[in-house]
Structures are given as C-alpha cells and as structure tokens.
Image (cartoon, helix red, strand yellow):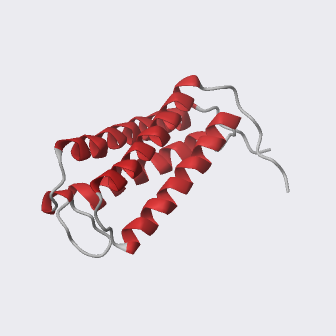
C-alpha cells in the first residue's frame, strides 16, 4: 500500500485541528458534569465524531496531503452535527436538543465554542484545498 505524500507543515491548520479536539473533549466532559442520561444513538454519534476528529488531527500533524480535505469534511460535519444534535429542538432519537433540556449557560458555551472551532477548521481546510497546487495528468 502506497503512503500518501507529506506536505509542508501548516501551523494554522494544526492549531485549528487541535483546538477542535480540545473543545470537543471539554464538551464530552460537560455531558458527564450534567449528570443526565443520553440516548445511546447520540452517544454513538459522539464516539464516531470523536474518532473522526482524532484521525483528522493525526493527518494534519503528519502533514498528509489529505489533511486539508479531512479538515474541511470533519470541520463541517462537526459544525452541522452540533446544530442538528444540540442547537435544534429535540427532533428524535439522534437528538439531544438543549432548548428542551435544563442545561446551564456553561453547557451552551461548551456547545458554541466547538462549533466555532469546527467552522474555523473547515474554512481553513477549504482555503488550503483552493490554493493547493494542481497536479497535471501526463
């Protein structure tokens, strides 16, 4: 299996990816602080999201050529995922809508901060994709 080529270091992309990971971990810890039961499907989505963020951070830190694409996809998925799961009112088993729950202001902050980090990451990844040199087919 051929390894993806390594590209130059991108400090801003590294910072944004680690920021998303850190804010997501704080969000996960906030669920424990809330001390309430969460639907198993919502927990499953969270675990899949956490794993995708960790994999994306690994690509970014290694300077993999797929890092900007992974950053864009994972960033937008987390941004819109937080909206669907937490910001929107309860709409079903994949929802943990904060508007319908007795959560405090800190929990709301710990939802919006990862959303901001995710959007920043997604836009940085998109920017890197748009400015990447194009390979020409022989």
- Residue 100 in the figure: left or right of residue 75: left
Residue 20 figure quarter: top left
In the image, is residue 91 above or below residue 86? below
Residue 4 screen position, x and y as percent: 76, 45
Near-viewer residue (90 or 6) = 90
Q: Residue drawn at (48%, 57%), measured in percent from left and top?
A: 49
Near-viewer residue (98 or 131) = 98
Near-viewer residue (106 or 93) = 106
- Residue 123 in the figure: left or right of residue 38: right
Near-viewer residue (130 or 5) = 5
In the image, is residue 130 above or below residue 43? above
Q: Residue drawn at (39%, 73%), measured in percent from left and top?
A: 41
Q: Residue drawn at (28%, 54%), measured in percent from left and top?
A: 34
In this view, the residue farthest toward the right is 1
- On-image quarter of the C terminus: top right
Q: Residue drawn at (57%, 39%), measured in percent from left and top?
A: 68
Residue 101 figure quarter: bottom left
- On-image quarter of the N terminus: bottom right
Residue 2 screen position, x and y as percent: 84, 51
In the image, is residue 36 above or below residue 136? below
Residue 122 screen position, x and y as percent: 44, 41
- Residue 86 in the figure: left or right of residue 60: left
């Amino acid at each position: 299996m051929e390894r993806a080529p390594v590209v130059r270091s991108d400090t801003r992309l590294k910072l944004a990816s680690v920021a998303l990971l850190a804010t997501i971990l704080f969000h996960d810890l906030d669920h424990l602080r809330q001390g309430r039961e969460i639907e198993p499907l919502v927990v499953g989505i969270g675990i899949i999201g956490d794993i995708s963020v960790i994999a994306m951070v690994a690509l970014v830190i290694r300077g993999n050529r797929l890092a900007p694409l992974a950053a864009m996809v994972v960033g937008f998925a987390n941004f819109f995922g937080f909206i669907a799961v937490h910001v929107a009112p309860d709409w079903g088993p994949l929802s943990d809508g904060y508007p319908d729950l007795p959560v405090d202001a800190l929990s709301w902050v710990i939802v919006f901060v990862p959303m901001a980090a995710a959007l920043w990451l997604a836009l940085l990844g998109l920017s890197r994709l748009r400015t990447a040199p194009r390979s020409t087919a022989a």
